[in-house]
Image (cartoon, rainbow, N blue to C red):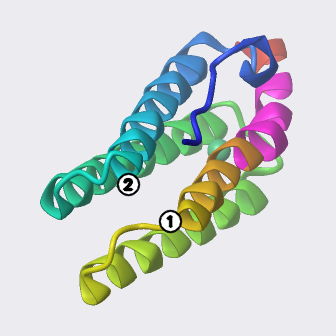
Amino acid sequence: MTNITWDKSLSVEVDEIDEDHQKLVNLFNILSNSVAQDDDADYIDAVLEELITCTVWHFRHEERLMLLHKYQGLMEHRAEHNELIDSVRELQQKFSDDKKPLTQEEIEFLEGWLTGHILGQDMRLGFFLMKVM
Ligand SMILES: [Fe+2]
């Protein structure tokens, strides 16, 4: 089972962003556990949809902060958000078309999807916001 443990290494040092990320990590862990337990497909689909919906909401939150504080990296960061949403929607579509459980590989893909963005673009954003907020 793949779980993400929240710790300081994932903090971008901006509380309102860290709070969103903790929520996303929590949802990811619920999803990962329900896949490992082979829960009902409707339930897994609901968790996946909740994770995606929260992620979209969170991305808009970050984009608002970037606009408010005139962050130079906005375009690049927003493009990565859009790519991330496209790739997880693709996975969701595949899951609903195939009617097969998510694989461990797909869960690991989602783990990398979430932590990779936090440790990359979001750290750079956090470093900037920390100085201007
Ligand atoms: Fe982001």
| Residue at the disc numbered 1 | 85
Outermost residue toward the front in this view: 37
Say which element carries label 1. helix
Badge 1: how crowded within 10 Å, few (<14), some, or many (20+)? some
| Residue at the disc numbered 2 | 52
Q: Is residue 124 located in the magenta-colored stretch of the structure?
A: yes
Q: Is residue 38 located in the magenta-colored stretch of the structure?
A: no
Q: From which residue to which does the magenta span run?
A: 117-128
Instruction: Kindly identify the residue that appears in the image at 63 percent across and 49 percent down.
Output: 111
> Does 121 sit left or right of 24 as displayed?
right
Q: CA distance from mark 1 to mark 2?
A: 7 Å
Say which element carries label 2. helix
Name the residue type under label 1. Answer: Ile
Task: Tell me where residue 74 appears, x and y as whole percent.
Answer: 72, 52
Task: Tell me where residue 67 appears, x and y as whole percent.
Answer: 62, 42
74 and 110: which one is in front? 110
118 and 31: which one is in front? 31
Q: Quadrant of the C terminus?
A: top right
* CB within 8 Å, label 1 to label 2: yes
Asked if 93 appears above or below 111 in the picture, the reply is: below
> Does 92 sit left or right of 96 as displayed?
right
Q: Quadrant of the N terminus?
A: top right
Residue 17's label in the rendered image is none
Q: Is mark 1 within 8 Å of ligand 1?
A: no
Sequence-first disc among 1 and 2: 2
> Does 23 sit left or right of 17 as displayed?
left
Instruction: Kindly identify the residue that appears in the image at 74 percent across and 13 percent down.
Output: 13
